[in-house]
Amino acid sequence: MNFIPAIDPPGQPSPQGWQLAFVGSQLLLPAEDDALLGPLPGGGWAADAEASHYLGTLDGLDCWALRLPQAPAGWRAVPLRSAMMGFARGPEAQATLAALAGRAAQVLEWDRTHAFCGACGTPTTLQRGERARRCPACGHTAYPRISPAMMTLVWRPGQVLLARAPHFASRMYSALAGFVEAGESIEQCIAREVAEEVGVRVKNPRYYGSQSWPFPNSLMIAFSAEWDGGEIVPQPGEIEDAQWFDLQALPQIPPRFSIAGHLIRDTVAALGGG
């Protein structure tokens, strides 16, 4: 599926359109579990939407993010994380929708939280030609916020360091992650977060990839890094457990719908773990 981002809708709408619709923070999916999300004819639910934002085209059809007051008949509201995992497990066409659903969620949340100027409290207005809300009183302009966060998989010969936070699913372990602070480079963030969370030092960080992550508005920037000394000391309140795991004996790790799932599997394979 080919997505082309845009901000202003075309003068002539497509006869069908993709509508990534939300009730609160939950995505609308067909009520039947085995039904696939697809384009809707005409305007779909646009007339009932509390908020509507054009996202671009998906395979030549207009694509919209909508916020609805309630789920229409025949549809159900599903937590976004669960929906994205379901997309990733489905056909390739449905898997492509996971990133688009995340984009829609972030745009709608930005719109909701910036309806009023953060500087003077005046109602803001949407701008044409850019994804922005502007205050007519003081001129303050608010764009969708993106929070950069690093993810690092620490390794040493034959082993990788995985940790679990208190909010993880039962028995789930993953790579280390944390938000970049003001005035900090990604490399500085890697060294600081790894030291804070597990007490070890790292060297030779190697860029792996990135992923937009709508929980709530992150850009996950993933690396692998070589252990450079120190014993594991989990950070109280942040890390419930952290261990070195042999490449052939990994615990439960995130699925491939998240960049953590790709990073761990691909790094382990590169290190000779299959």
Image (tube, rainbow, N blue to C red):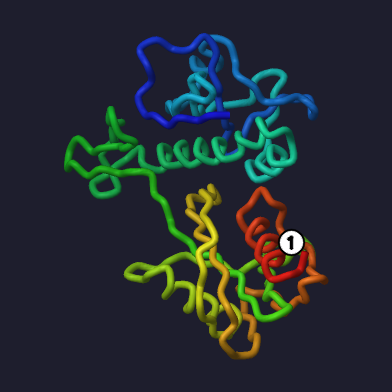
* Residue shown at the point (30%, 48%) measured from the top left: 118
Q: Is residue 178 above or below residue 234?
A: above
Q: Is residue 123 above or below residue 172?
A: above
Comparing 196 with 31, the one in front is 196
Quadrant location of residue 12?
top left
Q: Position of residue 193 (x, y in %)?
A: 51, 75
Comparing 229 with 127, the one in front is 229
Q: Residue furthest left?
A: 138
Q: Amino acid at mark 1?
A: Ile
Q: Position of residue 84 (x, y in %)?
A: 65, 41
Q: The N terminus lies in which quarter of the figure?
A: top right
Left or right: 273 in relation to 145: right
Q: Residues within 10 Å of mark 1 (few under 14, many from 20)?
A: many
Q: Is residue 15 above or below residue 147?
A: above
* Residue shown at the point (79%, 67%) measured from the top left: 251
- Mark 1, residue position: 253
How many numbered dots are placed on residues in this image? Answer: 1
* Residue shown at the point (55%, 41%) measured from the top left: 102
Q: Is residue 50 above or below residue 206?
A: above
Q: Secondary structure at mark 1?
A: loop
Q: The C terminus lies in which quarter of the figure?
A: bottom right
Q: Position of residue 98 (x, y in %)?
A: 61, 39
Quadrant location of residue 101?
top right
Q: Residue furthest right?
A: 249
Quadrant location of residue 88?
top right
Q: Position of residue 54 (x, y in %)?
A: 43, 26
Left or right: 256 in relation to 235: right
Left or right: 130 in relation to 28: left
* Residue shown at the point (65%, 30%) measured from the top left: 93
